[in-house]
Amino acid sequence: MASPPSFDQYRPHPWHGLSVGENAPDVVNVYIEMTPSDWIKYEIDKETGFLMVDRPRQFSSQLPTAYGFIPRTYCGDRVGGLSDEVDDGDLDPLDICVISECPIDRAEVLLSARIVGGLHMIDGGEADDKIIAVLENDFVWGDVRDLDELPEALIERIRHYFLSYKMVPGETKSEVEVEISYGAEHAKRVLQASIDDYNELIGK
């Protein structure tokens, strides 16, 4: 009779079983949840690690980049403490948008991305920062090191998406605010705060 498989033969949980990345905070591992072609909002199920349907998108605005999270991060008190407007993080992994020349057209993939900046988003009174990164070794964007090296129109497109993605048809006001953008230096502080929150609240 064959022996049962050992634990290390099972797929690791994308949030807890993968590393932030050997070259963090400059280059991080990213688990992709959504792509620009998705009309359904997907997100990781925290219990199982599978990708689940969150909700259909109600407007036609298109996600400008691949989108996911950085493993072994958590937006708690330290992430919230970096904000001048709120005190709490959203209690989720740190979100990240990854810019690439060629569209990333499938989710549940892993990639390496270089952090170049971020958007300070407030959602329902909680800090919900969106880190902005470029695909590592991308032939067009791979040499970018800071947010001000990216086209302003692209950053505004990302900002507009997050301002509108939770709005309900017929309503004109959103509970989401995205007023502040920041460069690589602050983005790395947000990353480190999320790593420290993870290590304290979820454990090494």
Image (tube, helix red, strand yellow):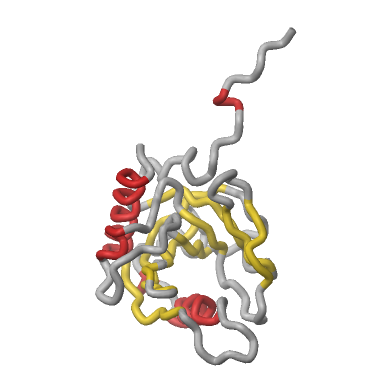
Q: Is residue 75 left or right of residue 171?
A: left
123 w.r.t. 27: above or below: below
**Residue furthest top as drawn:** 1
x and y percentages locating residue 15 in the rendered image: 49, 46
Rendering coords of residue 190 (x, y %): 31, 60
Q: Quadrant of residue 149?
A: bottom left
- The residue lying toward the viewer, choosing from 13 and 106, is 13
The residue sitting at 54% across, 40% down in the picture is 13
- Quadrant in the rendering for residue 180: bottom left
Residue under the image location 39 percent in, 53 percent down:
74
Considering only vertical position in the picture, is 56 above or below 59?
above
Which image quarter is the N terminus in? top right
Q: Is residue 64 left or right of residue 188?
A: right
Which residue shows up at 32% across the image and 63% down it? 187
State left or right for residue 82 relative to residue 176: left
Residue 67 placed where, x, y %?
54, 62
Comparing 15 with 106, the one in front is 15
Query: Percent from the top left, x then y, of residue 151?
Result: 44, 78
Q: Quadrant of the C terminus?
A: top left
Give the image quarter of residue 193.
Answer: bottom left
